[in-house]
Each structure stands twice: as C-alpha cells, then as structure tokens.
Amino acid sequence: MTTTAETLSRIATRPTWAEVSLSALRQNFRTVRKHVGAGVTVCAVVKADAYGHGAVECSRALEAEGATWLGVTSLDEAIPLREAGIEAGILLMTGFWRGEENEIVRLGLTPTVWEPWHIESLEKAAAASHVPRHPVHLKVDTGMGRLGVSLDGLPAVLAALKTAKHLVPEGVSTHLASSEIMDAPSVADQQRRFEEAERMWRSAGLEPSFVHIANTGAVISRRETWNNMVRPGVALYGYYLPFQRAGREVSGGTLRLPVKPVLTWKTRILSLRDFAANQALGYGGTYVTKAPAHVAVLPVGYADGYNRQNSLQHLQTRPPKVQQLDCFHGWSTGPGCHGAQSSPGARGVTE
Ligand SMILES: Cc1ncc(COP(=O)(O)O)c(C=O)c1O
C-alpha cells in the first residue's frame, strides 16, 4: 500500500487515481447484514484483492464493522490478511494446493474441501501440529460444474471426513451458476441437489454450523438460498448484475439493494479543445461531432484499466449543450501511460 504522501505526489505528476471509501464499504456491509437479518452470518468476500479495492484495508474496515468471516480465493490471498492482524474466520473458497496444508493449519484458515486428498492431507497437518479440531467447509457441486464434490462422490468424502479425527466439518456450501436469472431452471435444480446432499450429510451424522449458497445475486433475489450464511462479494463494493426473466432485464422493485460504489475513479482535464461540427475524433475517427464541440481530453487510457470497448462510446450531456467525452483515448499512446504510475499504485483510501 502506498502512503498518502506517495499517492499525492503521483497524483501531482499523473493525475489519474482511484479513491476507495472505506465508510461506503462499511455502509454496504451494514446494508447487506440488515437485508439478511441477524440469523444469517455474512461472509464478506474479499477475494482478488477485494475486487481490486485493496484486501488488507477493506478487511480491516469490514472486521471493524463486525465482519466475523471473510472469503478469499486461496492461501496466497489469506496470508497478507493474517499478517495484517485480521482475526476473522477466513474461508479459502477454492480449496488449496498440495503442500499448503501445514500453513493453512498454522494460520487458522478454513479451507473448502471436496476431494479425499484434501481431507487426508489436512488431517495429517492438524495431527502433526497437535490441533485437536481444525475446521473445514465441504463444497458440493450441485450443477455449476466448477468446484465441489458431485452427489455421486459425496459418500466417499463424507466417509473420509468421519474418520478424520482432527478435522471438524464446520460448514457445507455450494455455488449457483445463474443467481441473477430469475427463471433459470438450473437454480431450482441446484437447490434440489443441495437438499439431496443435505439428506446424505445428515444421515452420515454431519451437523455443520454453517450452510451457505448465496452470492450477491442470491442475497438480493433468493431468500430461500440464504440458510445461515451468505457470501456476497460485488455488492459490498456497490454493484450487482442486472436481474433477468425471459431474457429481459427485470431489475428494480424488490430486486434491488441500496448499496453504493466504494471506488471513485478521478482524473483532471488535460486539455480543452474546440472543434467544429463534422470533425472526426480519436482512433479511426469513430466519433464525429454533430455540432460545434468543446472537448475535454482526459489522461486516462487502457493502461489505467479503461475498457477499450468503451472507446468514445460514453457521451454525456452535462451541463446542457456541453458534450463530455468520458475518455478520449488519443492519450493512450501519449506520455505518462507506461506502467508504474497507472491506477494500482495511485489508489488512495479514505475513511
Ligand atoms: C464461491 C464464491 N462465493 C461467493 C462469491 C461472491 O460472488 P459475488 O461477487 O457475485 O457476490 C464468489 C465470487 O466469485 C465465489 O467464487
């Protein structure tokens, strides 16, 4: 993480930066918690560097707001959190690689497991470290076809868990493929398979403290999937995907959650130009002025993370009679676009 002074000096020489509002993040977490109610634990997903917002800073803020669980992809994302003093439960949502089991036990991380070798290696690591009961969360693949044990493979994994005396199956989870598609038959199919899995794990004597399915889409739209833990990611940062039914967007109404963007991308106007009507602008001359135009050139390009597909697409009229190009990509081959000073290094955090 850069210091405020470093960020400010970079902003002075390359005035394009991202600001992360930790208070907005905390507010979004409160919004999700209120939405699901007191009986449902929110596992705040901070994978992929908290979706690019800075995992350590975001995790600290979420923990200060009362988050007791954080979700990351893998061990490499969990280590900096523990090193930063994060004490919340950390769920390794995509399991682990062979050889990581000792570190997982040492750092008190909670791995997702679904293969017999996961259980065998963790059992050995916990026994060797004299850890009496290390928690694991079992993942069932109910139809997403990504991670988790299939229903066919479940009996063998349940048997392995039963014999692992140093592990405690604290949670069971699955992941939905189409939580935003309101009429996707796959969601009901996945739920049915999860219920079947539940009958199997219960008859094998498993009594997990946490059962979890829901990502952001399901948190907003599918109360029946909440169980007693949810795993929202993108909502914490202020967004969710549009909901659809019969191929059409049906967002709004109850399909909404009042979260707000945590990240603001800022820049300064580099140059103001006046053009006559019918002037082609930018690469390929893809935008042609319809009337005399006052054009602001911003020092933002693809190197900063600006999506090339947005090139000269986003026109706003603000205030009336002034057309503002969100981004004029002529800059992307200009000075200042090369590497180190682009957005990640110039990420400021506000309280
Ligand atoms: C297993 C799992 N759970 C939850 C999430 C959070 O998803 P979302 O950002 O849609 O809330 C993810 C994100 O990729 C995930 O992989």
Image (spheres, grey):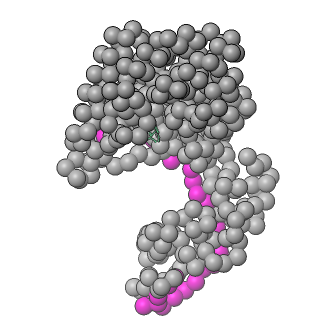
How far across and down, in percent of the image, does residue 194 sit?
A: 31, 26
Q: Residue at x 42, y 32 (%)?
A: 148
Q: What residue span does the magenta drawing correspond to?
A: 254-282
Q: Nearer the viewer, residue 254 or 215?
A: 215
Position in image of residue 346 (x %, y %):
70, 56
The answer to which image quadrant residue 72 occupies is: top right
> Within the magenta stretch, is there residue 52?
no
Q: Position of residue 251 (x, y in %)?
A: 30, 47
Residue 259, image x, y percentages: 45, 41
Say which quadrant the C terminus sits in. Answer: top right
Is 19 in front, or is 89?
Answer: 89
> Is 233 placed above or below 296 here?
above
Is residue 87 visible in this depiction of the protein?
no
Q: Residue at x 40, y 20 (%)?
A: 156
State which quadrant residue 272 falls in: bottom right
Q: Is residue 310 above or below residue 136?
A: below
The residue closer to the viewer here, 102 or 82, is: 102
Q: How many marks?
A: 0
Q: Residue at x 55, y 9 (%)?
A: 165
Q: Above or below — where is 262 with respect to 305?
A: above
Q: Residue at x 41, y 40 (%)?
A: 146
Is 140 left, or right, of 266 in this rendering?
Answer: left
Q: Is residue 281 magenta?
A: yes
